[in-house]
């Protein structure tokens, strides 16, 4: 006797996100405007404040606002975004709660240039420590950090 039941197969699609940016977590107990002022002075950048990032918090049923700053290096074709990871009512990325700010660098940057940038960031006195972050390990990073 032949069975009319067919075997079901489940196929899983794994989508690899191509991260065309780098992330650096910054630990600093200073306010965002003091941090940006120090980075601008020390690294000769020109970050400007842009609209806050607004994220809806399902748990609390409210919107959370995180400060954001932007700088474009037109000579090197690089864009930089500096996000606060904290606001009075919550944390943007709970899995990296020890980071106060996140620096996103969009564009092609050699490893030597990236290491030089890290060295310069370490020289900013109000930054306790910079940490290289891996976007694939941060939940929802692909949705937030894009260009």
Image: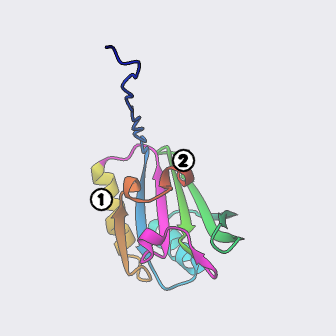
- Front residue of 59/137: it is 59
The dot on residue 115 is 1
Local packing at callout 2 (Cα closer than 10 Å; few below 14, some 14-19, many 20+) is few
The dot on residue 146 is 2
Looking at the rendering, the stretch of residues picked out in magenta corresponds to 87-110
- Front residue of 89/49: it is 89
The dot on residue 82 is none
Indicate the position of residue 76 as horizontal and vertical percent values: 46, 45
Indicate the position of residue 122 as horizontal and vertical percent values: 35, 73
Q: Residue at x 39, y 38 (%)?
A: 14
> CA separation, marks 2 and 1?
22 Å
Local packing at callout 1 (Cα closer than 10 Å; few below 14, some 14-19, many 20+) is few
Residue 25 falls in image quadrant:
bottom left
Query: At numbered mark 2, what does the secondary structure look like: helix, strand or loop?
Result: loop
Residue 127 falls in image quadrant:
bottom left
Q: Residue at x 41, y 55 (%)?
A: 135
Q: Residue at x 34, y 63 (%)?
A: 132
Quadrant of the image containing the N terminus: top left
Q: Is residue 103 magenta?
A: yes
Quadrant of the image containing the C terminus: top right
């Amino acid at each position: 006797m032949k069975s009319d039941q067919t075997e079901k197969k489940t196929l899983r699609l794994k989508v690899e996100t191509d991260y065309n940016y780098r992330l650096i977590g910054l630990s600093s107990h200073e306010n965002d405007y003091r941090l940006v002022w120090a980075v601008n002075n020390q690294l000769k950048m020109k970050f400007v404040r842009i609209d806050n990032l607004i994220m809806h918090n399902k748990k609390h049923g409210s919107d959370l606002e995180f400060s954001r700053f932007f700088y474009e290096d037109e000579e090197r074709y690089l864009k930089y975004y500096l996000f606060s990871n904290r606001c009075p009512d919550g944390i943007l990325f709970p899995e990296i709660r020890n980071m106060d700010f996140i620096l996103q660098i969009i564009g092609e940057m050699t490893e030597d240039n990236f290491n030089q940038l890290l060295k310069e960031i370490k020289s900013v006195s109000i930054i306790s420590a910079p940490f290289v972050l891996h976007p694939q390990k941060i939940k929802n990073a692909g949705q937030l950090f894009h260009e």
